[in-house]
Image: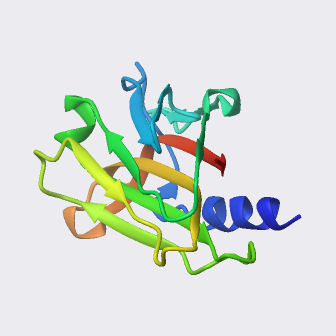
Amino acid sequence: MRRSRAVAAVLAAGGLAVAGCSAPGPAEITFYADGHTVRAAPIGLCDLKTGKCTPNPSAAGTLKARAGKPVQISVPGELAKSLWKVTVQSVDGNGEPLPLKQDLITSQDRYAYTATPPTPDSRIVVVEVAQGAAFSATGNPDDVQTVTKALWSLQVQPG
């Protein structure tokens, strides 16, 4: 139950509003934690032109990591050169969800990110990476919103 609440909290707070993501799909992201590595494809892609999104929940990555261990993320050039956001859900030593941590990456040349648990006894349980794009439904440059084009997810299990 706690895990599903934590996952729901991350998905609900994913941040960059999911609306229209784009094909062909971005490359896979590599996640590394506590000696384990996994590559994950997007769990969702949206096409900005049509507004259609294609879910692929089975693409989520899964790793094991012990409490206090960071999760490293390596992204492909297509993502590094765009606007992207990392959302991290951690739990404390008792398994209770901690506040979400979100970082917006705007440097356009950042290929890696390290998510660190807030305390030595806490554990990261979910990491999501969202690729954003500027979008204006009206064509007015003053009416630009950021929408999610692609979303990757990593589920971290106790190591």
| 65 and 76: which is toward the camera | 65
Q: Is residue 144 left or right of residue 155?
A: left
Quadrant, the N terminus: bottom right
Residue 142 placed where, x, y %? 22, 70
Residue 122 % position (x, y):
57, 72
Res. 119 in view: yes
What residue is at 57 percent from the left and 62 percent from the top? Answer: 67
Q: Is residue 74 above or below residue 130?
A: above
Figure quadrant of residue 4: bottom right
Residue 58, given in percent of the width and then of the height, sits at 69, 28
Left or right of 108, for residue 40: right
Q: Quadrant of residue 31?
A: top left
Vertical placement of residue 30 versus 153, above or below:
above
Counting from the top left corner in percent of width and height, residue 62 is at 62, 36
User: Farthest right residue?
Assistant: 1
Question: Closer to the camera, 28 or 19?
Answer: 28
